[in-house]
Amino acid sequence: MTDRRRFLTSAALAVASGGVARSALAALPEAQSQSSAATQPPLRADGAAYNPVVTLNGWTLPWRMNGGVKEFHLVAEPVVREIAPGMVAHLWGYNGQSPGPTIEVVEGDRVRLFVTNRLPEHTTIHWHGQRLPNGMDGVGGLNQPQIPSGKTFVYEFVARRPGTFMYHPHADEMVQMAMGMMGFWVTHPKGRHPHVAPVDRDFCFLLNAYDIEPGSYTPKINTMLDHNLWTWNSRAFPGIDTLNVRKGDRVRIRIGNLTMTNHPIHIHGHEFEVTGTDGGPVPKTMRWPEVTTDVAVGQMRQIEFIADEEGDWAFHCHKSHHTMNAMGHDVPTMIGVDHRGIVGRINRLIPDYMVMGERGMADMAEMEMPLPDNTLPMMTGQGPYGPLEMGGMFTVLKVRRDQKPGDYRDPGPYRQPPRTQAYEWTGVTPEATRAPAAQPAQGDMEVKVRKPGSNAHEHH
Ligand SMILES: [Cu+2]
């Protein structure tokens, strides 16, 4: 499926021995590519003093050393990305994926990045948050000419500041970012840093969003806010991998937002501190506990906590529309509407009319609803106790006593110890005080019927 093992081997060799022929070093570094959307294990370089990051549903780009310079090769190109099982999107990205691979270096490293443009139009790369020479900042037209289709440009600078950064085009930005072009950059501190703690697990992902009509494959690039796919690293629940950690681990999660709205990221069962932004590490005296942090547009938030509560803990964006997939929008509220008797009459006009949401929307998650090709159900995912009724920006932090250090595999569902789970009350239920029931409107009734993928029909 992938040539990653070979890439890792050749990268490791290059890192270990510098054992690449002088003539080869005069050429471009091999452009390595990844075809799997599964989380790849961390890229451990020989002799590196840092604990490498793990990119959720992504990977880290191997490099080669050339005369003391770390060389990377990014290729901007059209890619096919699986958003979740059952749906693929035609996006633009880097080296086979959207987002592109994570670039991981150490403070003080001199970095040379070859950027080859295989898109049908020009592009550039802006290195969001970095201190660098003005001509390396990547704003097309302002700092450099755009990189034409088919050409390769070289960026070179020293990673001066430790921290978490992003990269993305600064050329036809609305289109290229709506198509999925973005990636992460992590600069580890050189030696011990007063505001950067060593951690046991270090995860990163980008918030992104797409508007892809059910049944189609390419995002609508002009959508500003009303996206129907809210994704982490171009994956929607249940396609987002879980964050698997050992009980007692210090966990760092780096979250960058390159969507066009803010995302309040929320964790269950633990409190965290924001230990860094794209402006750098936050001094310890300036941190406070949170369970939700808003990641505004163009921001990065780095959160840290001790994972000391065993279990399967939800981890998600707190905007409820962002934990839903396509088809959840534009549905009228039906709570309290009694459809009995009406469905039969409507069915004579519209044979496949279906009642949606007269008791709430939870039925949607269980319903065997026919979907158009290449789309995801609005509420989905199965847990050990039933449907999760989630989508979009949702995953699970799995904390386990017996997860081995460095093991990122999914340990499966958590089994609660006896008498530690909510249970049904089977004793006597006292009569509760109730508000008077709302009276349904009498007389004429207006019913609005909508089918997925069709225009609204109104019947009176
Ligand atoms: Cu959100």
Image (cartoon, grey):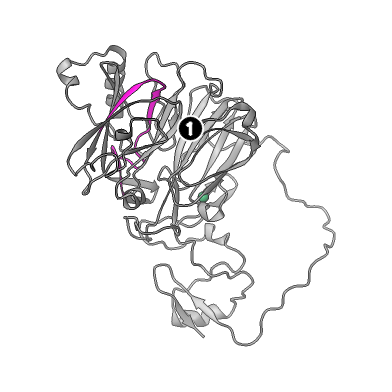
Q: Residue 264 at x, y = what percent?
A: 56, 46
Of residue 94 and residue 338, the one placed in the foreground of this image is 94
* Horizontal side, residue 217 vs residue 330: left or right: left
Look at the image and tell me whether residue 411 can be seen.
no
* Horizontal side, residue 153 vs residue 392: left or right: left
Identify the residue at image location x=54%, y=26%: 403
Identify the residue at image location x=28%, y=37%: 95
In this rendering, the count of numbered labels is 1
Q: Establish if 415 lies above or below 454.
A: above
Characterize the local packing of mark 1: few (<14), some (14-19) or many (20 or more) Cα atoms within 10 angstroms: some
Of residue 174 and residue 90, the one placed in the foreground of this image is 174
Q: Establish if 387 lies above or below 138.
A: below
Q: Residue 210 at x, y = what percent?
A: 40, 53
Identify the residue at image location x=56%, y=50%: 388
Residue at the spot of label 1: 203
Q: For the residue labelled by badge 1, is the local secondary structure a helix, a strand or a loop?
A: strand
Q: Establish if 236 lies above or below 203.
A: below
Q: Residue 196 at x, y = what percent?
A: 53, 24
For the N terminus, give its image quadrant. Answer: top left
The residue furthest bottom is 443
Q: Residue 292 at x, y = what percent?
A: 60, 43
Of residue 303 and residue 372, the one placed in the foreground of this image is 303
Look at the image and tell me whether residue 31 can be seen.
yes
Specify the amino acid type for callout 1: Phe
> Is residue 404 highlighted in magenta?
no
The residue furthest left is 23
Q: Which residues are magenta?
A: 91-114
> Is residue 92 highlighted in magenta?
yes
Say which quarter of the image contains residue 258: top left
Say which quarter of the image contains residue 269: top right
* Horizontal side, residue 113 vs residue 314: left or right: left
